[in-house]
Image: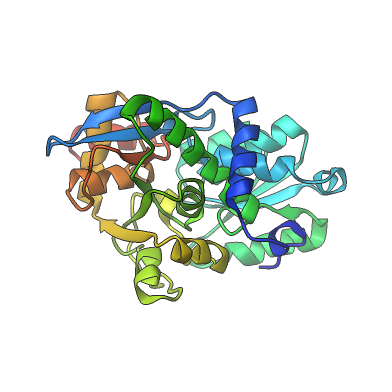
Amino acid sequence: MTNPSPHSDCRKPTREGVVRAAGKIAALLPPTPVLPLVLPSGATVWCKAESLQPVGAFKIRGAWHRLTDLSAEERGRGVVAVSSGNHAQGVAWAAARLGIAAVIVMPSDAPAVKLDATRALGAEVVLYDRRRESREAIAGDLIARSGAILVHAFGDPWVIEGQGSAGIELAAQMIARAGGPPTRIVAPCGGGGLAAGLALACPGADVVLVEPEHWDDVTRSLAAGQIVGVAPDAPGTACDALQTMATFPINFAVMQERNVTGVVVTENEIRAAQRLAFSALRLVVEPGGAAALAALVAGKVPSDGRTAVVLSGGNVDPAAFARVLAGED
C-alpha cells in the first residue's frame, strides 16, 4: 500500500530520531515503571510495564511521534491506520489530543475491549474480515478517497522511532536501578516496529524478539536473511496484537543490521507468563504483551542480571483474562 505522505518514503529511522521521539514522549507522559521480577529459575529480569500507558500499550509512543510531525496541511487531511486494537488506540488518542480526524481499519474479530476503547477515543472504526478481506486494500481506498495520511503500525520511520523511545527510558531506569544499561532486551513482535526501535535506542544490548507459534514470520525471516510471510492457513492465536502476516523492508533492514534474533513461544507458555505477571507484579498483561516474558519463563532466553523484558500491552478481555488466571483457557 502506498503512503501518500512523503514522511515514510524519504528517510530511514535513526537513533537521533529515537532520542527526539523520547524527548517528545517525556514532555507528554511519565515513564512507565521498570519492575524487578524473579523467574522460576531464580534469575532476575527487569520488566518495562508498557501495559500501564494511557491506552494500555506502547503504541501511544509511535503514534504521538508520527502525528506531531505532520504538517498543518497534513493534519487537516486526517489519518488512516490499520490495527487489531493497540495501535488503533494509540492513533485515536494522539489524534483526539491534536484535533485530527482518524479512521481505523480493524478486524471484526478484534477483542471488544479494543474496539470499544478505540471508538470511545473518537476514531471512526471500519471493520473487515481478516481471513477474507485485505486491510491494506480497504485502507488504500479510504486514503484515495479522502487524501488522508497513512499511519502504519510498524512500517514507518516515525513510528519505529517512537516505539524506540521505550528503550531510551529503559536504559536510564536500569542505570539507576540495576547498575548499568540493559545487556539484553526481550520484546514481543508483530511487525517488528518495537524490536527495530529498541535496537536503534540501545545499540549495546542484544535484542531478542518473541513471536507466538505459527506467527513467527520475523524470526524465520531473520534466520533466512529475507522476508518470509505467515502461512495463509495459520491457526489462530490469543495474541491478536502479534498477528502480522509479514514484516516490512524498513523494519527488517534495521533488525538485520543490529543482529536482532527471534524465538517462538506456545500458547500455554504465554498463559503461564500472564499468570506470573499478575501474581508477582499485580499487572494485567494481554497475551501478546506477555509473549516476551513467556520466553524467559520457559528458559528459551537466558537472563544475565541486566536482561529487560517489555510487557507491551494490557488490553485484554476481562472474561478471557479470568479464564487464564483460573487455568481454564
Residue occupying image coordinates x 47% and y 65%: 257
Q: Is residue 170 visible?
A: yes
Residue occupying image coordinates x 47% and y 36%: 113
Percent from the top left, x then y, of residue 323?
25, 36
Q: Is residue 91 visible?
A: no
Percent from the top left, x then y, of residue 43?
17, 37
Left or right relative to 40: residue 304 = right
Left or right relative to 81: residue 185 = left
Q: Quadrant of residue 136?
A: bottom right
Q: Total marks drawn?
A: 0
Q: Is residue 154 positioned above or below 75 on the image? A: below
Percent from the top left, x then y, of residue 64?
65, 39
Q: Quadrant of the C terminus?
A: top left
| Colour convention of the picture | rainbow
Left or right relative to 286: residue 42 = left
Residue that extends furthest to the left in the rendered view of this protein: 41
Left or right relative to 218: residue 197 = right
